């Protein structure tokens, strides 16, 4: 799988949808300022399990971590015709539970600037990564999850057609070690291809 990811050059991959452009984050002050605009909002980070950013430097540090991480591919979510990031989406080399032997699975994570909530941008971005995951990477399954209090993420995940699989209690280390329920959902490649068809868009029989 690693060779396939390198061949596709995912670290530099730009993904275009009907309304969005998912592009690599850049170590530039404009990207850091755009990230800080939503990362300082208490409705964003704490709901995804990370601390509120206190400065643009915090956001720049996060961008640098994105670019240095060789096991995760993270894109800035931008609107077509506007290069300013309004959110972030990543394909993580992890799963909420141990994968079956020789199964390639990943997990999608996302955040969006609250100013852009209610436009179905997240489902559009997630669906683009699902197509990449199954059509190009040939993954066996893709996971997504949310904490019990994150109703917006739950709705976005449900809109993308993920099947609920299990829930478990987790410690939120960045939120005073609070114990909360986390809910996990999954798309399998088999179900995705059965529902959406192969790469040319034709429904499989």
Image (cartoon, rainbow, N blue to C red):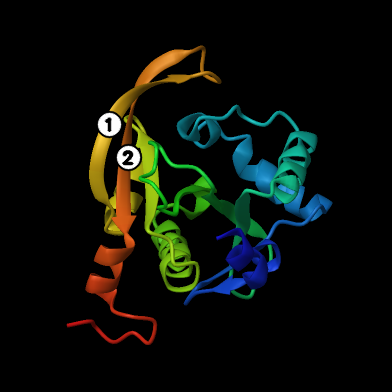
Q: In the image, is 165 to the left or to the right of 32?
A: left
The reply to whether residue 82 is visible in this rendering is no
In the picture, the quarter occupied by the C terminus is bottom left
* Viewer-proximal residue among 82 and 155: 155
* Residue shown at 44% from the left, 54% from the top: 104
Image coordinates of residue 4 in percent, x first then y, are 59, 67
* Residue shown at 24% from the left, 83% from the top: 203
Residue placed farthest to the front in the image? 101
The image quarter containing residue 51 is: top right
Q: Bin the neighbour count of mark 1 within 10 Å (Cα to Cα): few under 14, some 14-19, many 20 and up.
A: some
Which residue is disc 2 drawn over? Answer: 184
Q: Are marks 1 and 2 in contact (CB under 8 Å)?
A: yes
Is residue 185 shown above or below 126? Answer: above
Image coordinates of residue 187 in percent, x first then y, are 31, 56
The reply to whether residue 86 is visible in this rendering is yes
Badge 2 marks a residue whose secondary structure is strand
* Residue shown at 71% from the left, 28% from the top: 54
Q: Bin the neighbour count of mark 2 within 10 Å (Cα to Cα): few under 14, some 14-19, many 20 and up.
A: many
Is residue 180 shown above or below 147? Answer: above
Q: In the image, is 34 to the left or to the right of 126?
A: right
Image coordinates of residue 49 in percent, x first then y, are 50, 30
Q: Which mark is residue 202?
A: none
Image coordinates of residue 98 in percent, x first then y, are 39, 37
In the picture, the quarter occupied by the N terminus is bottom right
Badge 1 marks a residue whose secondary structure is strand
* Residue shown at 35% from the left, 52% from the top: 156
State which tag comes first along the sequence, 1 or 2. 1
Which residue is disc 1 drawn over? Answer: 167
Residue placed farthest to the left in the image? 205
């Amino acid at each position: 799988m690693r060779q396939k990811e390198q061949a596709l050059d995912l670290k530099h991959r730009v993904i275009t949808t009907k309304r969005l452009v998912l592009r690599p984050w850049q170590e530039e002050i404009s990207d850091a300022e755009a990230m800080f605009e939503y990362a300082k909002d208490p409705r964003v980070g704490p709901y995804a399990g990370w601390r509120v950013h206190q400065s643009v430097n915090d956001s720049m540090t996060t961008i640098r971590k994105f670019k240095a991480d060789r096991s995760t591919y993270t894109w800035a979510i931008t609107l077509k015709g506007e290069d300013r990031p309004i959110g972030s989406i990543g394909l993580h080399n992890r799963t909420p539970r141990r994968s079956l032997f020789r199964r390639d699975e990943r997990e999608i994570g996302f955040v969006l600037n609250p100013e852009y909530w209610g436009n179905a941008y997240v489902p559009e971005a997630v669906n683009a990564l699902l197509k990449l995951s199954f059509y190009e990477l040939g993954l066996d399954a893709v996971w997504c999850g949310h904490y019990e209090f994150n109703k917006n993420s739950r709705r976005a995940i449900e809109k993308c057609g993920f099947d609920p699989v299990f829930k478990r209690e987790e410690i939120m280390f960045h939120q005073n070690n609070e114990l909360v329920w986390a809910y996990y959902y999954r798309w399998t490649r088999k179900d995705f291809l059965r529902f959406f068809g192969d790469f040319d868009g034709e429904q499989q029989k």
